[in-house]
Structure formats: structure tokens, C-alpha cells
Amino acid sequence: MIERLLVRLPLIVILMGLGSIAMVVPAAHAYAIRDLHVARVFLYACLLSCVITAIIALATDRLVVRRRARGYLITLIAAFTLIPAMLAVPFYEALGTTRFSSAWFEMVSSMTTTGATLYEPRRLPDSLHLWRALVGWLGGLLIWVTAVALIAPMNLGGFEVLSDGTIGDGTSSSASQITRVADGSERLIRFTMRLAPIYGGLTLALWVGLLIAGETPLAAVCRAMSTLSTSGITTGQGGQAGLAGEMLIFLFLFFAVSRLTFSSDSGKQGWRGLLGDPEMRMGLFLITALPLFLMLRHFVGAYELSGGTLNLERALRALWGAVFTALSFLTTTGFESAEWDTATKWSGLTTPGMVLMGLALIGGGVATTAGGVKLLRIYALYKHGVRELEKLVHATSVGGAGKVARRIRRQGAYAAWVFFMLFALSIALVMLAFSLAGIGFEKATVLTIAALSTTGPLVTLAAGEPIIMGDLDNPARAIFAFAMVLGRMETLALIALLNPDFWRR
């Protein structure tokens, strides 16, 4: 009964309903801590939003007879731009000392799992910290579900590397069912029922683990939701879990490295299939090689600084800080290890922010909550490069490894290169827009990469001096918000919307 009702409603209405119901959580939390003003605001906003959603649902019931792929792409754009306006209403009213545009920016940042914030942590009540983390968590779930239910059949989001169809048309042999009437809605419901329990269960497990490790309840639940959604949203409190908490978060960050950690769509089962996954192998290589390189650099600096004597404990702590932070930024989460500064104190050398920006640009796995270029595209370009070098040495050689590997090296590498060029063009255009808004080159670079890779914490860690988002003027904030949506939707999806054939069919 419920499934039949949901199929009849537009996706945007369903998202409005979920956002309205989610307001109950911060309302209950605020009431529990006796912050009655915030509790009333969220309760009234919940009731008002539910009424508006019900009216729209009645008006649009069975209005859309045949749903096209382009309709879902437009809905996703609206989900990251219009839905945050509804979610910003209780945030704006509860805080009372901010503008609505700033509250909308905050919700866009959370919904796109970017995690950039305009506010100092101490300025926000605890319930608003919970609301930001919850919105980011819901945004991560939306990305999880739509990636496999809608984006994959349209050969977008990194799936074009593996697909045999045309980018953006949904005509691959493995996904032709997207063209059937209402099939998108059916897939959304089916994959939501399949993935939501996994997503929620993993979040609950990490929350309980952090509580056992000694973290405060609010910080634990916010970090758990931010880890699974890779939003990197924190409360500015907590930290009592220490090394044990970081190890737990480190393990759960791997769910943003490869979709095979929570899905078996490729037919490969167990640890062998996971370790043989190209994305997992690329991720493991990066979080191993890069920290070791940084460790060697700091080792030389510490050796010279100490006059030939080294502290093994500091060295191991610095190595762990580098490994944790590397994985965090590779998955575009942006958590900083408590030991990240240990290397600087140990060697007297600072860690270049370009390293973190490079990791964020690479990004995590396809069909995960991570942003960036994605590991699968990097892998396709790498395999193509290796094959070209082999042909330089043995011009008449024939590449093997099967049909899939050949497709990745040829059509997959071509699609990955097209996306990489579009991504580079997006960086140039967004940087140009920031420059026109009066932002300097270094700040414009950091802001652009942070927005397009959906890695908000880059603004405080990658620049020479931390960038205070609250100091940006309205044009710069608008550019950053647009870039966040562009980075989350990916340029290929927006280019697909501009294709005349995409609309003609």
C-alpha cells in the first residue's frame, strides 16, 4: 500500500516529506535538554512542512504519468537547492541571529555532504549541531540510493567507465529497464528498502562504538553520521574517545572507498572480491604510499632538528596521524587526526596543503557518498597509461585480461578523460568567478577545490591561513553554494541535461 502511494508521488514531494519528519529529531533532543525555544521552533516547522507537503502531494498525485530520466536529474538538482530552503527555516528561527541566506547556505553545505560552515561551533546550540549532522546524513543516504537506482542506469557518476552504453542516455545492456514507465520510482523504493537498513545499521554500530570508547553522546552521534555520509560535520566538542575512536572511524571510512563494502552488484563475494576491487586497491595504495612519503620527509627534518636522535613514539604517532588524515580526505570526509600536528612538532616541517587537496580531488569510490573525480576513473586512466607504455616497448602486443579490462582501458579511459577535462574546466571557471568576486588566488583555489570535491574542512587545513567562511561576502557564498551542487551532481550529469537528444526522447 505504502509502496504504491510512493510510486504515484513525485520524488521531490517524497523528499520534502522525509525532511519534514526529520525535524522531529532535533525537536525531541532540544526538549530533552530543556532548550524549549529550539524545541518549539522545530516542532512548529515540522507541522507546517508536513501540511505543505500533504497539500502538494494531493495536488500532484498521479500528475506525472511517464517519468523520464531527465526528470530525476532535475529533481536531484532541486533536492540540493530547494529542499535546503525548507530545512533552513527552523535553523534560521532557532538561531535568531543570522540571515536566511546564511541558513540556506548551511543546509546546502550539509545536504551535499560538504560540511563547510559559516558559524563558530560555540555559537550554535547542540540541537542545531545535531540538525546539521542529520541533514548531512540524509543527504548521504540520498546519494547512496540515487547512485545505484538512477545514476547508474544513465551511465553517469563513474559508471560510464564500466558501461557499454552512451553517457547519459540509459541505454546500456545492463540498465535498459530505466526507460520503462515509472521504473525509476520502483528502483528508488527497492534500493531504499535494501540500502537504508545497511546505512542506518552501520551508523548505529559506529555510534555505539564511539560511546563505548568514551565519546560524549552528542559528539558520538554527529561523528557517526558524518563518517557514513562523509560530510565531516563536527560539533566542536568531544574528543574523549582518543585513539580508539579514531580507529573506529578509520574502519568505517572504507565504506566510502568502494561500493563493494556494502553492495555485491558485481557478483564478487567476500574479502577476495573486495581486495580485488580496483577502487579498494587504489585506495589502499594511496593511504600507504603517501603517509610513508610524508613520514620520510618528516623523518629527515626530525633527524636534522634533533641532531641525530629520534623519538620512536612520536614517529609512530605521526605516522598514524598521516594515515588517518589521508584516508579521511581521500573519502572527502575531512576529519583531522589528533596526531596530525604531531609530525609538525616532531620535525619542525609543515605538511603542505596541496597534499590534502590532491587527495580530495581524487575522491572515493563510485556509488558512495564521497566526492571528487572518483578512484575508478583514476584507475581507468592509469591502466590506459600502462597499456600505452607497453605498446611503446612491444608495438605488436595484444592487451589481455578479458573483455571488461579492455573496455576500461579504451572506452572507460576515454570517458574518464572527458570527465577529468570537464572537472578541470569547472575548476577554472569557479576560480575565475571567485576572482571576479574579489578573492585572492590562493583562497580561490582552496575554496574551489573544497566546493567541487565536497570537502569543506579543506578551507581550514589546506590554506596557509584558515579561511573564515563567515567573512565571505554574499557573491562569494553564492558561488561556493553553486560549486557545491555542481561538485555533488558532477559536470557530466549537467551536460547530459543540455543534450537535445536527452530531451527529445
Image (cartoon, grey):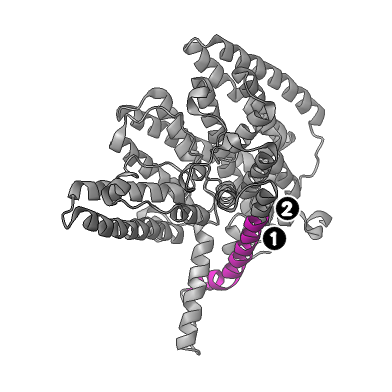
> Please, what is the three-letter code of the amino acid marked with disc 1?
Thr
- Per the image, the residue denoted by label 2 is 179
Q: CA distance from mark 1 to mark 2?
A: 8 Å
Residue 198 shows in the view:
no
> Please, what is the three-letter code of the amino acid marked with disc 2?
Thr
Which residue is at a point 81% across and 56% down the rendered structure image? 505
Which residue is at a point 49% across and 78% down the rendered structure image? 387
- Per the image, the residue denoted by label 1 is 171
Percent coordinates x, y for residue 35 in the rendering: 52, 11
Q: Residues within 10 Å of mark 2 (few under 14, many from 20)?
A: some
Query: Above or below — where is 254 with respect to 118?
Result: below
Say if mark 1 contacts mark 2, CB within 8 Å.
Answer: yes
Q: Residues within 10 Å of mark 1 (few under 14, many from 20)?
A: some
**Element carrying mark 2:** helix
Query: Above or below — where is 108 with respect to 398?
Result: above
The numbered dot on residue 484 is none
Count of numbered tags: 2
Residue 445 shows in the view:
yes
Q: Quadrant of the N terminus?
A: top right
Residue sitting nearer the eye, 189 or 83: 83
Residue sitting farthest toward the left:
309
Percent coordinates x, y for residue 219 in the rendering: 41, 27
Residue sitting nearer the eye, 410 or 491: 491
Q: Is residue 404 magenta?
A: yes
The main secondary structure of the magenta stretch is helix
**Element carrying mark 1:** loop
Percent coordinates x, y for residue 132 in the rendering: 55, 29
Percent coordinates x, y for residue 100 in the rendering: 68, 26
Q: Is residue 194 magenta?
A: no
Q: Which residues are magenta?
A: 402-429
- The mark nearer the N terminus, 1 or 2, is 1
